[in-house]
Image (cartoon, grey):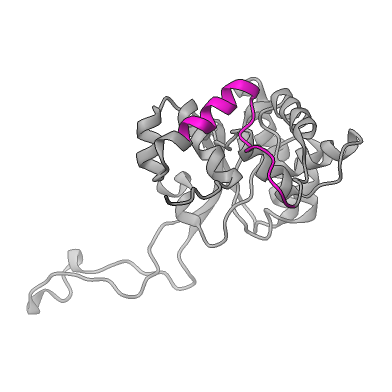
Amino acid sequence: MTKTRELTPFKRGEIVGLYKGSHNITNISKTLDIPRSTVNDVIVKWKKDGLTSSSPRPGRPPIMNDRDQWHLNRLIRDDRQQSVEDLTKKFKEMGLKSVSTATIRRNLYELGYHGRAGWENVVWSDESRYLLFQNDSNHWVWRKPKEKYDVDCLLPTVKQGSPGIMVWGAFISNKIGPLVIIRENINAKKYLEILQKHLLLFFVSLGNENKYIFQDDNAPVHRANIVTDWKNENSINFFPWPAQSPDLNPIEHV
């Protein structure tokens, strides 16, 4: 008989997560390539005591016991939008064990919790420059040899760069935000001024502003200390943006 391998906390969390997502035991077994009996055992234990951890086995004891997981479960139910970092900090402030964010994250998976982003609550933003004339020197024109100087085969040119306008905009899934004309070079101070004058009002207009998440990319002016401090002081929820990923922002396609 083949020895059944011990499931990791993450894998147990996956089983419970799929079950809570209305997948049946057979479907979960096929999806995760885990014996049906094993899937059933994990779900039965979760239904019984709300935990996914296996029975105690010889060896190193877990960092967090059932009591610790009970407190963690209470914390996450108090505020579903907390970050792992915030949960770790609160866990320590309650006088419980001093644990790492990795331990908290692992135990959240054990409890069957998985992070989900509510994309409809994200306020997307960015700056963009619109040019009157394109400044790319390579343009393709279909013409006959004698049409070299025909007006419709020529492109207008400017001597000192193409004139244009810089704007900042924001929007959410069901509402367009302000479009702000930027008449000077953008820097951290100017960007902060835009957020102070326009972003806060947009958040207020949405109602229940604490549930929304603000997005901006990793441009230096967006990550300046004065900007980050202001976001924290005004309880602006925002999430880390992956480097070199402009196409992930829907506003790039507007």
Seen at 75% across and 25% down, the residue is: 74
Front position in the image: 67 or 108: 67
Q: Which residues are magenta?
A: 39-59
- Quadrant in which the C terminus is drawn: top left
Front position in the image: 54 or 58: 58
Task: Please tell me whether residue 47 belongs to the stretch shown in magenta.
Answer: yes
- Relative horizontal placement of residue 155, taking residue 117 as reference (left or right): left
Question: In the image, residue 144 lies at what x, y percent?
Answer: 7, 74
Most distant residue in the right direction: 95
Q: Is residue 51 above or below residue 141?
A: above
Q: Is residue 228 above or below residue 120?
A: below
- Relative horizontal placement of residue 15, taking residue 199 as reference (left or right): left
For residue 134, which quarter of the picture? bottom left
Seen at 36% across and 69% down, the residue is: 157
Question: In the image, residue 76 lies at what x, y percent?
Answer: 71, 29
Seen at 49% across and 56% down, the residue is: 246
Question: In the image, residue 216 lies at what x, y percent?
Answer: 60, 48
Seen at 37% across and 71% down, the residue is: 136
Question: In the image, residue 112 lies at what x, y percent?
Answer: 59, 33
Task: Please tell me whether residue 217 belongs to the stretch shown in magenta.
Answer: no
